[in-house]
Image: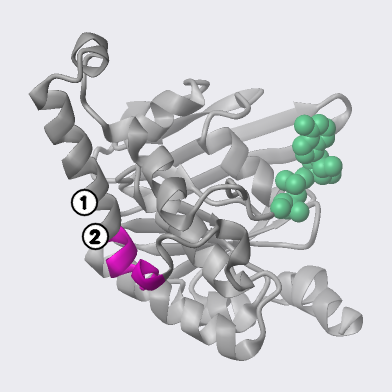
Amino acid sequence: MDAEKVLSTDDITIRFGGLTAVSKLSLDIYPGEIIGLIGPNGAGKTTCFNIITGVYAPTEGKVYFKGKDITGMRSDLITKEGIARTFQNIRLFQSMTVLENVLISKHVRLKANPLEAILRMPRYTRARRRHYEECMELLRQVGLEDVAHEMATSLPYGKQRRLEIARALATQPTLLLLDEPAAGMNPQESLELMKFIEQIRHRFELTILMIEHHMEVVMGICERITVLDYGVTIAQGTPTEIQNNQQVIEAYLGAVETNA
Ligand SMILES: Nc1ncnc2c1ncn2[C@@H]1O[C@H](COP(=O)(O)OP(=O)(O)O)[C@@H](O)[C@H]1O
Ligand SMILES: [Mg+2]
């Protein structure tokens, strides 16, 4: 295994009963890249994220993260290894504040032993304090500081999306998986999101794998793109190569045009 790769999926396949949702997908992602995963609805994109994050074990194939085999590893352990994700449908704790949402997520990284916690020993108190400050700093970095104490539900849609990303960042990932981050956004909001994703890539030294339907976002920030159709990889290449690929135009871009 090449340790230089951040993520590598080696011919992963998953079957649900008679349906092959993902078939022999091989992805290689290098440090600092933004990679796009596109394809029509039902193509198997979210399922790929579920395999990478340990929600499902693949029927065949292997997933390597920084050279380590993580195939079938528990989701929480994969988070600790350094992979974080957002969901196609926003999943926030609605009855909590913005800050609380990030605090809970960051808990994965809180180093305290249970006895210290129960006895509220100084080291634990200091760790809690630092934990809180780091979360506030994170909110500052993603531009949500001013709404830190508001309920997550009260945020406009675009900010809820941003909070979801902040929550993922709180676990200190190396690899960030974004599942349709621009879903439901207008062109202006999509453009802002694009800039935001670029910013966090640099600021947090991230590698990003992104599922997205908004072509202006995908073509605008992804260095390389993989196209799935019915679980099968029909193309891999640069945005220009993908835009000019006849099979992609027919399977995907064509379908989008007729739907529009
Ligand atoms: N847990 C599951 N059980 C059975 N079928 C599933 C399951 N998860 C996903 N699928 C099926 O796999 C296919 C790919 O789904 P998905 O990965 O969500 O597509 P996409 O994200 O590309 O729209 C769909 O046909 C979906 O119904
Ligand atoms: Mg999906």
Q: Is residue 22 visible?
A: yes
What secondary structure is the magenta-colored segment mainly? helix
Task: Provide the secondary structure element on which disc 1 rests.
Answer: helix
- The amino acid marked with disc number 2 is Glu
Please state the horizontal and vertical placement of residue 244, each as a whole percent of the image.
Answer: 63, 82
Task: Please determine whether, in this image, residue 6 is positioned above or below residue 198.
Answer: above
Secondary structure found at label 2: helix
> Which residue is tagged 2?
137
Horizontal side, residue 136 vs residue 28: left or right = left
Residue 94 in the magenta stretch? The answer is no
- 199 on left or right of 237: left
Outermost residue toward the top in this view? 115
Residue located 24% across and 45% down the image: 4
Nearest the viewer among 234 and 188 is 188
Q: In this view, does 184 lie above or below 102?
A: below
**In terms of image quarters, where does ligand 1 lie?**
top right
In space, the residues marked 2 and 1 are separated at their CA atoms by 6 Å
181 up-or-down from 207: above or below? below
